[in-house]
Image (cartoon, rainbow, N blue to C red):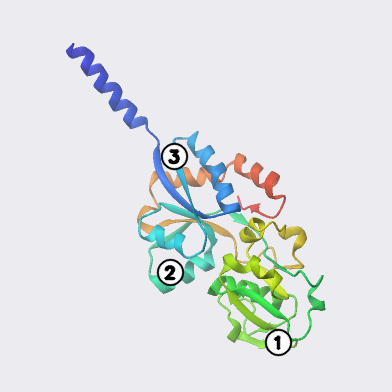
């Protein structure tokens, strides 16, 4: 009997040690969450259990990570993370790049930027980095001039020339697709554009440069950056299965960076 009980206890111990580690990874709903669902399947086959937690805005995923309600997140580009850290002091770090996706501007009224009338209303994101991203697209295409066209923290106050007297409306990034009916031009982050049924590669009337600073990233708390599960998460994301999914599902709208 004692031998049997010892064998049962040993089996239980081995089963416990073989149990996959579980981490919670935050993402905004839409493409980022869809991609993580594929990452989750790849990771599961490699001994890492991922719980995908979806958010509806850009602020809460970093807050949740800083407060230890998540182990990682995948939704943002590095300029946005740096801006958040500058305001909060959160100890969050980039551990890998994920996808690149040239952002576009959209209009239901006009086919090209040159058609915008004087005084046209333009909606951009109300957070600093994504607002700058919208302004930089307009500057790239000559609608406005910025004090420093390469400054990823540019604001409306940095516009030095606005020949069409464009009127800017700042909205939460998640609300921008809904404003298409009400304004003349909207700068929409690709994850929200896709979620709203838009195809950035086809429906946008202008895009940013593909080699800009807006590559998306995986982020974790600084204290966790060297933990084994971080490498497992990165390896699962940087897998052939995820790359194939990106090519099939998004057809160039989201591009693997590995």
Query: Where 196 falls versus 148 (above or below)?
Result: above
Q: Residue at x 18, y 11 (%)?
A: 1
Residue 146 against residue 215 in the figure, above or below: below
Which type of secondary structure does the marked residue at label 2 adopt? helix
Q: How far apart are marks 2 and 3 (CA)?
A: 28 Å
Q: Earlier in the sequence, mark 2 or mark 3?
A: 3
Residue drawn at (64%, 67%), measured in percent from left and top?
Answer: 178
Residue 85 position in % (x across, y down): 43, 69
Q: What numbered label is drawn on residue 205? A: none
- Closer to us: 167 or 94: 167
Of 134 and 236, the residue lying toward us: 134
Residue at x 75%, y 79% (from the top left corner): 142
Q: Quadrant of residue 117?
A: bottom right
Sort mark 3 into few (<14), some (14-19) or many (20+) by Cα contacts within 10 Å.
many
In the rendered view, tell whether residue 100 sits above or below residue 3.
below
Q: Relative to residue 193, is residue 206 drawn left or right?
A: right
Q: Position of residue 77 (x, y in %)?
A: 55, 62
Of the residues under marks 2 and 1, which one precedes in the sequence? 2
| Residue furthest out toward the top | 1
Q: Earlier in the sequence, mark 1 or mark 3?
A: 3
Q: Is 80 situated left or right of 118 in this image?
A: left
> Tag 3's secondary structure?
strand
Say whether residue 66 is left or right of residue 123: left
Taking the view exactly as shown, the residue that stands out farthest to the left is: 2
Q: Which residue in the structure is indicated by mark 1? A: 162
Where residue 39 appears, as percent x and y from the top left, is 54, 43
Q: Mark 2 points at which residue?
A: 85
Instruction: Say how many tags the image has.
Output: 3
Q: Mark 3 points at which residue?
A: 49
In space, the residues marked 2 and 1 are separated at their CA atoms by 31 Å
- Pointer 2 and pointer 1: residues touching (CB < 8 Å)? no
Residue 215 % position (x, y):
59, 60
């Amino acid at each position: 009997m004692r031998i049997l009980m010892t064998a049962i206890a040993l089996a239980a111990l081995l089963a416990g040690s073989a149990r996959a580690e579980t981490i919670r990874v935050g993402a905004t709903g839409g493409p980022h969450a869809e991609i993580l669902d594929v990452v989750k399947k790849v990771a599961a086959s490699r001994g890492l259990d991922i719980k995908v937690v979806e958010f509806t805005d850009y602020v809460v995923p970093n807050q949740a990570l800083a407060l230890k309600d998540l182990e990682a997140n995948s939704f943002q580009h590095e300029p946005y993370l740096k801006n958040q850290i500058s305001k909060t002091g959160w100890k969050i770090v980039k551990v890998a790049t994920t996808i690149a996706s040239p952002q576009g501007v959209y209009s239901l009224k006009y086919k090209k930027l040159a058609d915008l009338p004087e005084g046209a209303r333009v909606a951009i994101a109300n957070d600093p980095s994504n607002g700058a991203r919208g302004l930089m697209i307009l500057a790239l295409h000559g609608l406005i001039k910025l004090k420093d066209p390469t400054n990823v923290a540019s604001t409306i106050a940095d516009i030095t020339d606005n020949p069409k007297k464009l009127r800017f409306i700042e909205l939460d990034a998640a609300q921008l697709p809904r404003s298409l009916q009400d304004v003349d031009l909207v700068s929409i982050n690709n994850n929200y554009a896709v979620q709203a049924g838009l195809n950035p590669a086809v429906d946008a009337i202008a895009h940013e440069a593909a080699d800009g600073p807006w590559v998306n990233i995986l982020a974790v708390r600084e204290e966790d950056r060297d933990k084994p599960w971080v490498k497992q998460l990165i390896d699962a994301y940087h897998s052939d299965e995820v790359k194939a999914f990106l090519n099939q599902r998004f057809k160039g709208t989201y591009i693997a960076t590995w």
